[in-house]
Image (cartoon, helix red, strand yellow):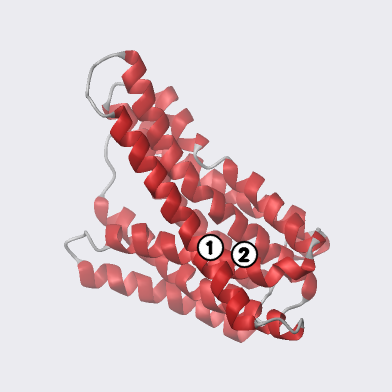
Amino acid sequence: MINILLELSPVMQAFLATLFTWGVTMLGASIVFFFREVKKGIMDALLGFSAGVMIAASFWSLLSPAIDMANSMNMISWLVVFLGFFSGGLLLFLGDKIYDLMQKKGGKKDNTTSHKLKRCLMLVFSITLHNIPEGLVIGVAFGSLAYSLEGSNLASALTLALGIGLQNFPEGSAVSLPLRREGYSRKKAFFFGQLSGIVEPIAAVIGAILVLKIQTLLPFLLAFAAGAMIYVVVEELIPESQSNKKKDLMALFTLIGFSIMMILDVALG
């Protein structure tokens, strides 16, 4: 299986990896067919683990290679990496603000179909907005394999996709379960739940192509992806996992995720 992946282009590798992450989103959304609720402890453990993976990947798979490549191109490495990192986080910050404005305009509660549809679309939009940079992250990670950067290898890219995929499971259910409680049929709740993940393969292909076509953009894009990931981790994953009563156990899952990603990056890099 690994040999087959190695023979594929980085764009196809990124596309297949994000088909997996979309599949996990679908899996998360599909629990609406079986349960009305999912144990919070399981969801929080997945989020904590994914947070650890993404924090480690943001440095060893993204920021460190970005600095090395910027230096090799005689760029001002700290400035390029700062601009990329901050831009990635700022994009999601602005996306959150846009979503908040949409939510305020959607404001008053009523029982009309149009209002229910509006709430549904806003819920899907918020999750989709965060999935676009995650797809870009995977695309950039696989695209950078073409340049044989230190710390950039297939194992770390696959583990990054796994970490992002795991946190997509709660995201899928976070859309489908509330919609089911609001009276949507199981099929409709599942459809909207999985819909939020469909942007990841598209964004991954775009990210990989950008990296391959415009090499000088790679340091910026790697740092951009890292900034987007750290924002998601700090804004969503860690706060949600730490809302669990067993905060110490959730923190341990974060450490486990970080350690696994760190070992893969350092040992195999």
- Label tally: 2
Q: Give the structural element (helix, strand or loop) at label 2.
A: helix
The answer for how far apart the CA atoms under marks 2 and 1 are is 25 Å
Which quadrant of the figure has residue 181? top left
Which quadrant of the figure has residue 38? top left
In-front residue for pair 24/213 = 213
In-front residue for pair 85/35 = 85
Give the vertical position of 150 relative to 107 (above or below): below
Give the vertical position of 115 relative to 135 (above or below): above
Q: Position of residue 174 (x, y in %)?
A: 35, 42
Q: Which residue is mark 2?
A: 158
Which numbered disc, 2 or 1, marks the residue that appears first in the sequence? 1
Which quadrant of the figure has residue 161? bottom right
Looking at the figure, which quarter contains the C terminus?
bottom right
Q: Is residue 184 visible?
A: no
The answer to whether residue 182 is left or right of residue 257 is left
Q: Which mark is residue 18?
A: none
Q: Is residue 139 visible?
A: yes
Q: Which residue is mark 1?
A: 87
Give the vertical position of 265 relative to 137 (above or below): below
Please report the residue visible at 32 percent of the width from the left and 35 percent of the height from the top: 103
Mark 2 nearby-residue class (10 Å; few <14, some 14–19, many ≥20): some
Please report the residue visible at 56 percent of the width from the left and 45 percent of the height from the top: 22
